[in-house]
């Protein structure tokens, strides 16, 4: 039988990872985990943690991460099978006998690696020989040092349809074709796949040659500039990252991994001393490639050309990553100046210019917002609604519920600020002097009565009353929170009249300094027992609006959680296991929410009465 994932899970479960690690690393107990100085990089303050329950280790300094098997491979230097055998002996388990089919496939792959390694030696020898003169001149013209040419294994495929077949005749046609080195046309004639091109070996995570990339010396119409090996038993381009075996150790030191568009970009960066770069192989980033990146660092940096094609490539990567986002797992984006690739930028502006860009990448959400905002003109309400629809469509692809909720809120806030900017004063309106008496604005008597009833407890008390009073004081904020208020109305029908009144107020109220809300102007002042910083006249407007935004978020969040919990309870009979787990998660979120609400309550404005050094926490309803 084969070594199945289930067998490996049992092996991990039987091994106390902390005991294994403590053979060579000093660990101390830290709650449910163990911590110590990371063995993969030099550090004085411990950032390396081992979790026996989850059976993995993780370094927050260099990003090293793995289980018992990877510990034996990466730290002890064993091969995979040697690591399996040693751990199985420790755990008292029998190593499964090899599956004959899998064993045959492994033997075939090993044989094919013999072919690709031999082909690499042939290409390197050809580069150094008489036929490689033009290729050597090309590499020199590109500015690649002799060290880089040797380190990355540049070679030359002679412009001869049978050169490789003659040089590697010991392997036979079937093996050469199986390794992707030869192909056949419709007439059955076999020929070398790579001819008249500079070659580059593509290596796996262990540094073994599994495929090739090749570039023509002189671009000409009808001839592909770059040519990669086709997929073989050795090579799956969707599961391979170019330069991974070199970049992974460098990333542990830098805490960063840079993803560029092609392998020549990787080499240009390495030529300048930036060694933590990788590249996909002619395709957009795949889910498997993203997982490989996240094993190295939490936030890989994607570096794209600044032209329209580079922007589209960035969005393809973002769309692929959104469903996979998780806490502390995202992407950052660097856009190069238009018309420049990494090599051009380094040659024209120097390595420091490249490092500055890599040091300040844009978060994924910023790139998503800017791309969709600038995708098409937004001159009409319909176009603006289309922008919001596109943003929310992206949000719906996110699987993690917490991250989805945060993205929805953040993008909704950005959309509201963009689509509902503060309005200019109405024609003929003159802002009065501070303290001047104003006639009541155009709010209807019914709307004014509803507002007064809401603030003074006619419908809800506490935080709701404070938020309504705050939005009446700062009516320009109503548009900013329109989406949140609409959500509140959907989840809490008693709040629907409130939302209607606030939207009416947005058309009629304006802020007139510190006295925007007072009975003489026809707008009810907040009750004396409602004391929050955003209602205190001494609070700066900017600070008050931020406090008010937090209050709105708290007001809306609990009804949404309660609605989600009710829906989860309702599906208990059809999915008891899933419903139970979801109920536990939502109840935990409600407990966390209550703590946040209490903490916010403690931030109220100081009471007026002397000696009253505490104020009761406001309830949601």
Image (tube, helix red, strand yellow):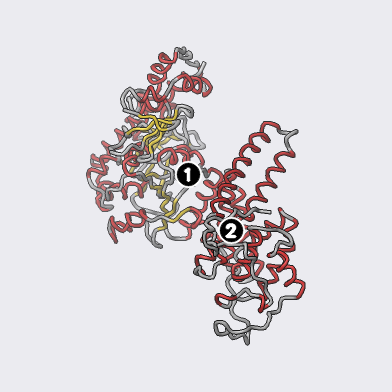
- Residue 610 lies, with reference to residue 508, above or below; the image says above
In the visual, does 366 lie left or right of 469? left
* Vertical order, 326 against 94 (above or below): below
**Residue 126 on image: x %, y %:** 27, 38
Give how far across and how far down residue 595 sits, in percent. Answer: 56, 47
Q: Residue at x 76, y 75 (%)?
A: 445
User: Between residues 233 and 600, which one lies in front from this camera angle?
Assistant: 600
Other-residue count near label 1 (Cα within 10 Å), few / some / many at <14 / 14–19 / ≥20: some
Quick check: 257 above or below 462?
above
Q: Are marks 1 and 2 in contact (CB under 8 Å)?
A: no
Rendering coords of residue 252 (x, y %): 34, 39
Q: What number is the disc on residue 551?
A: 2
Q: Position of residue 164 (x, y in %)?
A: 35, 33
At horizontal 53% and vertical 46% (from top left) the residue drawn is: 320
Question: Label 1 to label 2, Cα distance in Å?
Answer: 28 Å
User: Label 1 belongs to which residue?
Assistant: 329
Q: Quadrant of the C terminus?
A: bottom right
């Amino acid at each position: 039988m084969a070594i199945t994932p289930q067998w490996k899970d049992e092996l991990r479960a039987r091994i106390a990872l902390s005991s294994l690690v403590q053979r060579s690393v000093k660990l101390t107990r830290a709650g449910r985990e163990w911590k110590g100085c990371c063995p993969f990089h030099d550090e004085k303050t411990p950032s390396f943690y081992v979790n026996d329950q989850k059976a993995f280790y993780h370094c927050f300094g260099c990003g090293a991460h793995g289980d018992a098997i990877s510990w034996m491979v990466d730290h002890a230097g064993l091969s995979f099978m040697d690591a399996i055998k040693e751990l199985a002996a420790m755990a008292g388990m029998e190593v499964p006998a090899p599956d004959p089919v899998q064993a045959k496939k492994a033997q075939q792959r090993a044989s094919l690696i013999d072919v690709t390694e031999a082909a690499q030696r042939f290409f390197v020898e050809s580069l150094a020989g008489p036929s490689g003169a033009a290729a050597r001149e090309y590499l020199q013209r590109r500015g690649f040092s002799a060290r880089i040419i040797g380190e990355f294994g540049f070679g030359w495929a002679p412009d001869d349809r049978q050169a490789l077949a003659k040089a590697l005749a010991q392997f036979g046609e079937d093996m050469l074709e199986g390794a992707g080195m030869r192909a056949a046309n419709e007439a059955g004639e076999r020929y070398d796949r790579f001819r008249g091109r500079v070659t580059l070996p593509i290596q796996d995570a262990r540094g073994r040659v599994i495929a090739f990339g090749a570039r023509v010396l002189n671009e000409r119409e009808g001839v592909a500039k770059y040519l990669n090996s086709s997929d073989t038993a050795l090579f799956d381009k969707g599961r391979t990252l170019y330069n991974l075996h070199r970049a992974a150790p460098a990333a542990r030191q830098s805490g960063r991994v840079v993803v560029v568009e092609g392998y020549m970009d990787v080499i240009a960066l390495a030529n300048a001393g930036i060694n933590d770069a990788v590249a996909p192989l002619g395709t957009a980033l795949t889910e498997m490639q993203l997982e490989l990146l996240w094993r190295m660092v939490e936030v890989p940096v994607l570096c794209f050309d600044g032209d329209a094609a580079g922007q589209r490539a960035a969005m393809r990567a973002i769309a692929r990553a959104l469903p996979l986002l998780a806490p502390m797992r995202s992407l950052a984006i660097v856009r190069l100046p238009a018309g420049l690739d990494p090599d051009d930028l380094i040659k024209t502006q120097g390595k420091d210019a490249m490092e500055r860009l890599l040091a300040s990448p844009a978060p994924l959400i910023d790139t998503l917002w800017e791309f969709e905002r600038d995708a098409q003109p937004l001159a009409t309400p319909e176009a603006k609604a289309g922008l919001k629809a596109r943003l929310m469509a992206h949000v719906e692809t996110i699987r993690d519920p917490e991250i989805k909720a945060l993205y929805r809120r953040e993008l909704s806030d950005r959309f509201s600020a963009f689509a509902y900017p503060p309005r200019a004063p109405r024609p003929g309106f003159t802002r009065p002097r501070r303290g001047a008496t104003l006639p009541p604005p155009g709010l209807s008597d019914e709307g004014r009565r509803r507002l007064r009833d809401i603030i003074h407890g006619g419908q809800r008390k506490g935080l709701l009353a404070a938020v309504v009073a705050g939005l009446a004081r700062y009516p320009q904020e109503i548009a900013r929170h329109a989406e949140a208020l609409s959500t509140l109305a959907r989840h809490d029908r008693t709040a629907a009249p409130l939302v209607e009144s606030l939207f009416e107020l947005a058309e009629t109220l304006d802020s007139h300094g510190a006295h925007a809300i007072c009975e003489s102007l026809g707008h009810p002042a907040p009750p004396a027992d409602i004391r929050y910083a955003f209602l205190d006249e001494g609070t700066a407007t900017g600070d008050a609006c931020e406090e008010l935004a937090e209050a709105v978020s708290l007001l809306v969040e609990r009804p949404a959680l309660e609605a989600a919990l009710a829906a989860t309870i309702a599906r208990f009979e059809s999915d008891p296991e899933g419903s139970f787990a979801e109920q536990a998660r939502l109840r935990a979120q409600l407990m966390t929410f209550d703590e946040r609400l209490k903490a916010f309550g403690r931030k109220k404005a100081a009471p007026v009465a002397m000696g009253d050094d505490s104020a009761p926490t406001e309830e949601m309803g």
